[in-house]
Each structure stands twice: as structure tokens, then as C-alpha cells.
Amino acid sequence: MARYEIIGGKPLTGSVTVSGAKNAAVAILPAALLVAGTCRIENVPDISDVRILLDILEGMGAKISREETNVVQIDCTHITSTNPNPMLVRKMRASYYLMGALLGRFGRADVALPGGCNFASRPIDQHIKGFLALGAEVDETEDYVSMEPGPNGLNGNRISLDMASVGATANIMLAEVLIPGQTVIENAAKEPHIVDLANFLNTMGARISGAGTDTVKIRGVEALTGGAYAIIPDQIEAGTYMAAAAATGGNVLVCNVIPKHMERISSKLQEMGAEVTEYDDAIRVKTTQRLRHTTVKTRPYPGFPTDMQAQLCVCMALSSGVSRLTESVYETRFFGYCTELASMGADILINGKTAIVTGKESLQGATVYAHDLRAGAALVIAGLAAEGTTRVENIHFIERGYENLVQKLTGLGANIRRVED
Ligand code: EPU
């Protein structure tokens, strides 16, 4: 068991470099299954979700080597199994992308249902709807999804998603790139990692257009060949350091960001009184006075991301006045951290989809438990801002998605260490 011990109350200062985007990496690595050739993928974050995926792919016959920590070469020319190790698949959420990738490359897949952060009910009915529309026969049990081509084989189709699901949009793209015909995904998700996946696949020879809009078109091609690709910077990791700078009254230059992806986060922090300065590929967040209250509603991209809800809540908990934070993607997401923040002195009242946060002058250190990745990141920010010592337990959740968190925060002057029992 490991935990973070944080002695808080010190403003973060200096610069920090953001890693490659987790949610792009966890889609792009399974996408390599579609490529008969070598993919050289740069800017791959060294996080536990990525390590698990690489183990899964290796177990299926992929040849994997690392040139350096963040550069991975994957050759999936000789895949020997369409049944990835269920124990590993259940360790993470994004293993559902193996379904689309295997269906697309081999016309069949036997994949355990995914595990990962369970902060809400996270069905995959829209993914299955997409696979069925492409002509797959799907056998879904309580813990497995098996697919093979239906009587008319696999063909492109028009699919209208009931909600703009990131996972379903990406999974249908993966399934379609190698099958005949054209697929049109309507009400597609527009998140930056959807665009990154499309760019990766197009670099390897796919024909995808419209990624980043609500209509994505994919025309099947005969084969994908290898190539080189660099993953975009992580929008949520960047936002987490921006929120940490604001909550601690710090002055931090967050480097390796795409400022366009950060617009909603930047504007909310500005509204709360932080000075936010954009550069070509960096953003400075400087706070010289107590933050002001605000109102936020999470929405799919380009709205304020649900994955920044918890981190912004910490800023609200320290601001002057009463803030309102409404969640519209995952209603139960507050439960992962609000009680923990309350044990540090935060005043948060949950009323259905809205948290009403009455700001306090300070938070106090406590022992708190991460219940999922972003909830855990928020507890770290709270610990950095709080008076006294905070112990954050269950940090395996946090290490699923943040590369070198302790080193990066230490570089900003934080007093944080990772302690193993
Ligand atoms: N939904 C369904 N049916 C489906 C798919 C989704 O009802 O088949 C619902 C979900 O329950 C949710 C909404 O649609 O209410 C959106 O879910 P989405 O499919 O977009 O989420 P996801 O693909 O499971 C990804 C990210 C999450 C992020 C969400 C929303 C990955 C691997 N995960 O999840 O990231 O919160 O999109 O942006 O890309 C994180 O990084 O901490 C994280 C949880």
C-alpha cells in the first residue's frame, strides 16, 4: 500500500510540463491492433493504465519496445489471440477499445467487460449499438462481450448515438476503419482525444473525416500501414496543475498544452479571479488574492469537462462566497470526494446534480481516501492548499492517470512524498 503525504499551505511556483493525454493514449494503443506494421508512438504517458494496455497487447502477440520512457514501438502484424487477458482487461475502463479494434481487424472479439473508475454507472450500450449496426453478431453476458460477423458480414452504416459518448464514438471508429463501405456517426463526441485518435488512424492510412464535429465519416480501407505519431498533451492533467496553482495562491507556468483545449478551464479560473495568460503552447496561472465564487455546469467538449469537476470544486471550497457546481455527464460523481473534502473542513451540500459549495478561508489536513482518479487528484490539490499534513490513501487510482505527479509537484515547491508501507 502506498500513500501521498503532503504538508500543505505553500503556494506552488515554477513551471511544469504536461505529459501525453491519457484518454488519447488508451485509444491509440489498441488502435495499433489495426495496423499490420510498426507504429512509433511518441508522447505516451508513463501511467499504470498505459502499462496495463501494453501488457494486454503483448499477451496477444504484439511486439512492443520502448525507445525511451515516452516513446513506444508497437508491431501488431502477428497477433495470436483475439481474447485479451480478462484479468488485465478488468483492471481498467478503456480496455473496451479492444472490442472495436479486434472486430475491425479480425472480424471477431472476445473481451471481458472493463473495470476501472466506478464513480457512476457506465454502460456500453451505445458501443454495442454501433457494432450491431456494422453487422456484428454480439453475445453479451454479465462479464464478457463476444462478437463475430453476422450473416451479411461487416459493412459500413449510419449510426446515430443517443448521447455524444466518447467511448462509443472511438470504438465505432476503430471497428469501421478496415471494413467495407462508409460509416457515418451522428451525435459523435468532439473531445480532443477523438480528434487525436482520428489523426493517428489517418496517419496510418485510414480515411476519417469530421472528427471534432458531431458528424464523423469513416470510409473503410484495405489495410493500415505503420508510421510515426505523437500524442497530444493531456487537457485534464494541464487543468489539474492550473487548478492547483489557483487553489494554493501560486504562480505556475503549465507547459506543453494546447491553449484551445483549455479555454473553458482558463475562463472559469479567470472568472474566479486568477490571472491566466496564454502563450503558444503554455499557460500561466497566477493568483494574488482569494478566489471568488462561481457557477459551473460540466458538459461534453467544448464545455467544461466533467474530468475537472472535482479539481475545480477544491478551488470553490477555498473561494469567497457560495459557488454552484452542476454535473451533467455523471450524476453520482460528487460522492467520490465531497465527503473527503468535508473531512478537511469544506462546506459542500449536494442537491441532486448540483453541489453548493460555501467557500472557507482555509482547509485543514486530514487522512482522506481517493475513490477514483480525478477525485484523488482533487484531494491532492486540497492537501497542497490545506494547513497541516494530509495523507491521501488509495493512490493507485491517481497513478492510473498522472505521470510523475510527485516529481512534478515537488518541482513546483510542494512538500509531497510517496510513502510505501
Ligand atoms: N453512456 C451510456 N451508454 C454508453 C456510453 C456512455 O449511457 O454506451 C453515458 C455515460 O454513462 C455517461 C455519458 O454517456 O453518462 C458519457 O459517457 P462517455 O461514453 O462519453 O464516457 P467514457 O467513454 O466511458 C470517457 C473518458 C472519461 C470521461 C468521459 C466523459 C476515457 C477512457 N474515459 O469515458 O475519463 O469522464 O469520457 O468525458 O476516455 C477520466 O479520465 O478520469 C475519465 C473518467
Image: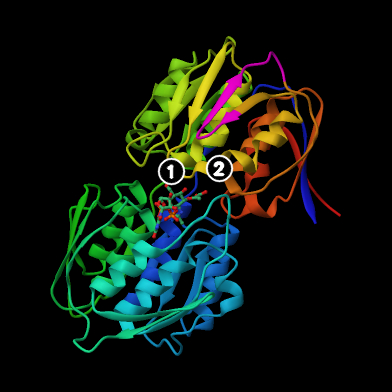
Task: Indicate yes or no whether the magenta region holds residue 143.
Answer: no
Label 1 CB, ligand 1: below 8 Å? yes
- Residue at the (26%, 76%) spot, across then down: 225
Number of the label disc, if any, that sits on residue 117: none
For badge 1, the amino acid type reads: Val
Whether pointer 2 and pointer 1 mark residues with C-beta atoms closer than 8 Å, the reply is: yes
Identify the secondary structure beneath mark 2. Answer: helix
Where residue 116 sits: x, y (%)?
A: 57, 60
Task: Indicate yes or no whether the magenta region holds residue 355.
Answer: yes
Q: Which residues are magenta?
A: 350-362
- Say left or right for 170 vs 393: left
Q: Residues within 10 Å of mark 2 (few under 14, many from 20)?
A: many
- Name which quarter of the figure residue 204 lies in: bottom left
Q: Which residue is mark 2?
A: 333
Identify the secondary structure beneath mark 1. Answer: loop
Q: In the rendered image, which quarter contains the C terminus?
A: bottom right
Where residue 355 sits: x, y (%)?
A: 56, 28
Q: Which residue is mark 1?
A: 329
- Say left or right for 221 vs 4: left
The answer to which of 124 and 177 lies nearer the viewer is 124
The answer to whether any part of residue 88 appears in the image is yes
- Name which quarter of the figure residue 76 lies in: bottom left
Colour approach in the figure: rainbow
Label 2 to label 1: alpha-carbon separation: 9 Å
